[in-house]
Image (cartoon, rainbow, N blue to C red):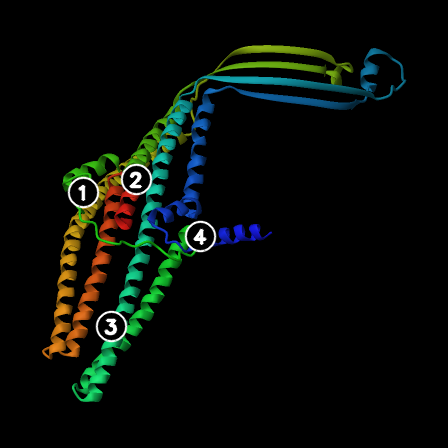
């Protein structure tokens, strides 16, 4: 019993440690794959669209129907009896039973509309494939954005806490200096005002952090306690798949999945014109029928007969006139095709524009991160010099507070710029149609190394 209690305690401890262990970006993404309702809806839609191919292929296969009938009739045989005899005797009613079984089979030989419908189904499945990939990319972007938003607000809380602690020390020192007469009340009031302001900023930052975590909770269906943040800024930020903006734009125009979706929509609209126009074409079917009936004609003759019939033949249908409805639907389909073409051009232009913007965000993010890294080093040096200057009497309490504020601001700005740069890289990969789990693994490695 004691051994079991010991094992149980170890298991509980292991679970507690795993729950307290910080989750990195890939951990959150793996949870989102199974918990995000929006992505699960996209998966269900993708699975539903796969059936379009089966439905389109059904137009080439035979249709078989089975029909069965059974009737019971009560026939007044008086009129029948009077035609065969002059007797005035009224015979009793005659009960006549009949039944029938008919099996019909139709095998399409030529139906132009069914051919076009099958082509449309293949295009719809292709579009569904691209839509599901876009849903996966959107999940990566939503998870990453929510993850970095939490990290940004965590940085705000950490900076506010550090500022509050540092300013509290300066406030206590200012009060002591004022008590011994080596500083004025102005220094004390300045430190007190900074402390009160930082306290309010800390409250606002904690509230923002709670909101950001609740946003992430909406994706993974649990409250994220601890998230892994970047331990250090990666040194090589310019390692990209393509070196120039034009190369990225070219890749986006060839591989962007949103563009492929619109291209498929244009193909479907063009095929719709062919489908409606095909209603002018004749149809040719192979038709076979087997019929087994008993009691046929019993209601007339008083005694039914049994019939078995078999038939097989080719059926030709030629549409001649349908009230101009086909011509009208063709004109409607042509207008929709023209609209899809313009929508395709719009998506192509927006794709190129977004690729250029995200490339600029990445390149500018690299420069900004490098500049902020140097700014943080300079701010730390300035703070050290200011603290030393205060100790020797050439700097005041206010100078130290300002230097601290500048150093913490540089630290916060650097972290947020780094997160923004990583997010821009993900968006740039998405525009080029190259955003996948491998890309997310690379970004995650830049956070946890």
Checking the image for residue 239, the label placed there is 1
Mark closest to the chain's N terminus, 1 or 4: 4
Give the residue drawn at x 50%, y 17%. 107
166 and 36: which is toward the camera? 166
Residue 269 visible in the displayed image: yes
| Relative to 261, 47 lies left or right | right
| Relative to 218, 97 lies left or right | right
Q: Position of residue 299 (x, y in %)?
A: 75, 19
Q: Nearer the viewer, mark 3 or mark 2?
A: 3
- CA distance separating discs 2 and 4: 24 Å
Q: SS at mark 3?
A: helix
48 and 40: which is toward the camera? 40
Q: Which residue is mark 4?
A: 221
Q: Nearer the viewer, mark 1 or mark 3?
A: 3
- CA distance separating discs 1 and 3: 38 Å
Give the residue drawn at x 21%, y 80%. 190
- CA distance separating discs 3 and 2: 42 Å
Mark closest to the chain's N terminus, 4 or 3: 3
Q: Nearer the viewer, mark 1 or mark 4?
A: 1
Q: Which residue is mark 2?
A: 438
Image position of 100 with respect to 239: above or below: above
Circles 1 and 3: CB atoms closer than 8 Å = no
Mark closest to the chain's N terminus, 3 or 2: 3
């Amino acid at each position: 019993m004691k051994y079991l209690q010991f094992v149980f305690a170890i298991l509980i401890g292991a679970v507690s440690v795993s729950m307290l262990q910080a989750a990195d970006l890939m951990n959150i993404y793996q949870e989102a794959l199974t918990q995000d309702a929006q992505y699960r809806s996209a998966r269900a839609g993708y699975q539903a669209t796969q059936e379009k191919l089966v439905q389109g292929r059904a137009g080439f296969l035979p249709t078989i129907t089975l029909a069965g009938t059974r009737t019971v009739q009560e026939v007044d045989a008086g009129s029948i009896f009077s035609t065969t005899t002059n007797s005035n005797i009224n015979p009793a009613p005659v009960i006549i039973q009949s039944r029938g079984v008919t099996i019909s089979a139709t095998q399409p030989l030529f139906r132009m509309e069914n051919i076009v419908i099958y082509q449309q189904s293949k295009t719809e499945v292709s579009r569904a494939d691209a839509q599901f990939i876009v849903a996966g990319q959107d999940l990566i972007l939503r998870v990453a954005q929510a993850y970095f938003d939490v990290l940004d607000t965590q940085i705000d809380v950490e900076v506010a806490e550090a500022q509050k602690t540092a300013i509290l020390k300066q406030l206590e020192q200012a009060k002591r200096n004022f008590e011994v007469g080596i500083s004025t009340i102005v220094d004390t009031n300045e430190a007190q005002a900074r402390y009160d302001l930082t306290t309010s900023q800390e409250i606002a930052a904690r509230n923002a952090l709670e909101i950001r975590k609740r946003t992430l909770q909406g994706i993974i269906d649990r409250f994220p306690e601890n998230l892994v943040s970047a331990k250090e800024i990666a040194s090589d930020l310019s390692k990209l798949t393509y070196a120039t903006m034009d190369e990225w734009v070219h890749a986006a125009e060839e591989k962007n999945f949103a563009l492929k979706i619109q291209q498929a929509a244009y193909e479907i609209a063009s095929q719709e014109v062919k489908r409606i126009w095909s209603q002018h074409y004749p149809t040719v079917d192979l038709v076979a029928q087997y019929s087994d009936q008993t009691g046929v004609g019993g209601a007339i003759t008083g005694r039914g007969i049994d019939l078995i019939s078999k038939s097989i033949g080719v059926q030709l249908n030629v549409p001649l006139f349908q009230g101009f409805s086909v011509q009208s639907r063709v004109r409607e389909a042509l207008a929709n095709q023209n609209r899809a073409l313009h929508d395709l051009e719009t998506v192509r232009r927006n794709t190129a524009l977004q690729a250029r913007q995200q490339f600029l965000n990445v390149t500018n993010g690299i420069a900004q991160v490098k500049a902020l890294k140097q700014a943080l080093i300079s701010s730390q040096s300035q703070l050290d010099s200011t603290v030393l200057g205060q100790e020797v009497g050439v700097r005041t309490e206010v100078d130290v507070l300002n230097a601290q504020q500048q150093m913490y601001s540089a630290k916060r700005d650097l972290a947020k710029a780094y997160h923004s740069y990583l997010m821009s890289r993900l968006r740039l990969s998405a525009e080029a149609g190259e955003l996948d789990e491998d890309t997310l693994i690379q970004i995650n490695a830049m956070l946890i190394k």
